[in-house]
Amino acid sequence: MLENFKINLKEIDKIKKISRDEKEFRIKNLNYFNKVGFPDKKIEDWKFSDLKGIIYKNFDKLNIKNINSKFKNVDLINDFDHNYITLVNGELNDINFKFEEKKNLKIKSFYNDNFLDRIQDNPLINLNHALSKNGYLLEVEENYRFKKVLVIYNLFTENLRDNILNSRNKIKIGKNSELHTIDLVINKSKHKFINNVYEDIILDNNAVFKNICIQNEKSEGYFHKFSKNTLASKSKYSSFIFPSGLKFNKFDLEFNLEGEESECNLQAASFLGKNDHQEIKTRINHFAPNCKSYQRVKNVLNSDGKGVYQGKIFVKDIAQKTNAYQLSKAMLLSDDSEFDSKPELEIYADDVKCSHGSTSGSIDEDSIYYLMTRGLNRKESVKLLVNGFLNEVIEMIKSNTMRKFVKSKLERHVHGY
Amino acid sequence: MLEIKNLKASINERDILKGLNITIKPGELHAIMGPNGSGKSTLANVLSGKNGYKISGELKYKGENLIEIPVDERAQKGIFLAFQYPTEIPGVNTNNFLKTSLNKIRKARGEKEVDTLSFLKIIKEKSIELGIDEKILSRQLNVGFSGGEKKKNEILQMKILDPNLTILDETDSGLDIDALKTIANGVNSSRDKKKSFLVITHYQRLLNYINPDFVHVLSDGKIVRSGRMELAEELEKTGYKKIN
Ligand SMILES: Nc1ncnc2c1ncn2[C@@H]1O[C@H](COP(=O)(O)OP(=O)(O)OP(=O)(O)O)[C@@H](O)[C@H]1O
Ligand SMILES: [Mg+2]
């Protein structure tokens, strides 16, 4: 059992070659984290996910030392041609953009270049700001469309044990450019660790970004990711997330629709089982007129799995003709499973179309009966229905290759049911 | 093939079947008619093994007591129910489902599973025979199917799974005249000395095509009359009121 976890300020002295601004920024954030600690359910944003309780219960100690992560060979996906980068415990290792014109992109190791950020009200962001030393920066020049998808292999190594990994990534996509990425977890770790990611994605006018995030390999990791996405005029962002379920797994996603006619589309599907606790929290800020946002979150919960969806749509007074849609559906397979959902609308414009809905319920017994009269046993019927339920999200992936790939990865998940 | 003796079934404290007797021999086709709410679908459900009913009496299929046998095993033993209201199942692709189902049944019979190619061949052949637009089979199972398409999809499954005992629960309701003929042909071409049918219907028209060996009238949970085809003709004229 861990108690009253604090981080010594000396840890920041260990980070070499940093400017005074940066040092101050880190110290300021660390002080804040030390004051508040891991968030607990008294904080509104964390009311369904008592991280402090979870961490204190499951960890005896935490190690903030950066782990020496040498390059590991990764089994690359064979299903389709792709560019890739490899992140080993968050650190940028291998880069391969063989399908692209190099002059149109820039990729490098990165942690931060902006020390003016105000103090955030999420202690995990402060922790990240204070300690992150790893991550990548990817910039795509104007008027360049990636020829092939970029796969980001997120490898977690065997020697992780009680570590807190803090990494920070940034993607900037220039005017009229287009990038597709797949985030894939490859897990070699055997023990508990915390993975805390801060992500910044910036789309310039008319830029297109499509991302598929697949955590198909389960670990003992406790994951938190904060993602800040900024969309300029007429840019389009689409994200499919297929999280695996972990002892703790929280996606905190903020979309800022700053330019007119920008669009974001977020879809998620998960199968959560024993000991899983997963939260998807979104905040969609409609700051400009004529923007669209679409969210669909589907969860299947088995055993004592717990799922949370907190989705907020904010529409600024000038953001007329906003079209915002939000839907959460949960299927509960066990009496011990739990799903909490908190949809929220905060609207200051009068000419908007906003709708939200949330349903959760057990599996349909009539459907099971129908399938069983055709010779499938109960388990097979449930599996077919669960896959069907989650498939509705997968079917929205436009590319055939990607859809097939995701399907094969995800069906293995449900396989364990 | 099927022996039902003094079958009683209740659900939610409501007695629905109140001592029902029918014996169906191999090769026979029996029709059941009866007013709305008399318990016809309940009988079909109970035969298929649906949960939730309190059951007493005797239910024997090929000499074996059925009551303890779960739904999927009954299907694997060759009992097939075509639903009055086929369930819509979102997200489940019809073809995938049909293939999974066929292979489960084949496996239970000790036959080799079919691969996708031969499966598609079977499907093509049967859909043409039944006048089914193959396109609907790449859609989600029964979702958005028209009433007639749903019924045809049930008969398609019957054809593919090739059961010993087929129960059709108002499969003819809601079908246009041509579809009715195709479905009757589908049933007729499946009939042989070994296979039996229990056909629930409200209309004589289907029976004209498929020539039942026996016609029964179910009323308030009991068989109140049994006879031959003439009984159906009589009912068409007089209705059920005079029967009781
Ligand atoms: N789950 C249930 N709970 C309570 N009553 C039920 C239930 N299921 C059926 N019933 C009742 O039992 C009776 C018989 O129903 P059933 O569906 O078997 O009739 P049916 O003969 O098939 O009628 P129809 O010709 O309209 O299809 C009806 O009065 C119905 O309301
Ligand atoms: Mg009925």
Image (tube, coloured by chain):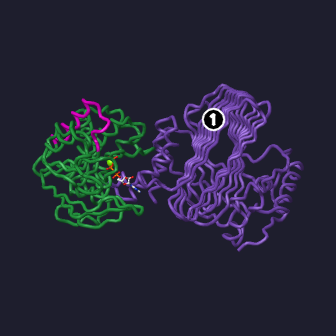
Rendered location of residue B168, percent (x, y): 26, 46
Q: Is residue A255 left or right of residue A35?
A: left
- Point 85% across, 58% down: residue: A32
* Highlighted magenta segment, given as a residue range: B170-189
State yes or no: Cβ of the residue under disc 1 lies below 8 Å from any atom of ligand 1: no
Q: Identify which residue, A113 or B190, lies in the foreground.
A: B190
Chain B rendered in what hue? green
Neighbor class of circle 1 (other Cα within 10 Å; few <14, some 14-19, many 20+) is many
Q: Tell me the residue that label 1 is attached to.
A: A209
- In which quadrant of the rendered view does residue B10 lie? bottom left
Does residue A121 belong to the magenta stretch? no
Q: Main secondary structure of the magenta part?
A: helix
Image point 72% across, 55% down: which residue?
A166
Check the image and name the residue furthest to the left: B193
Pick the residue in front: A169 or A230.
A230
Query: Residue A131 location in percent, x, y?
Result: 78, 56
Residue at 53%, 61% in the rendered image: A273
The secondary element bearing badge 1 is classed as strand
From the image, which quarter does the N terminus of chain A lie in? Answer: bottom right
Residue A396 rendering spot, x and y as whole percentages: 52, 38
Image quadrant assignment for residue A238: top right
When asked about the image quadrant of residue A289, the answer is top right
Residue A153 screen position, x and y as percent: 58, 48
Q: Is residue A11 above or below residue A147?
A: below
Between residue A197 and residue A334, name the one nearer to us.
A334
- Residue A213 visible in this rendered orientation of the protein: no
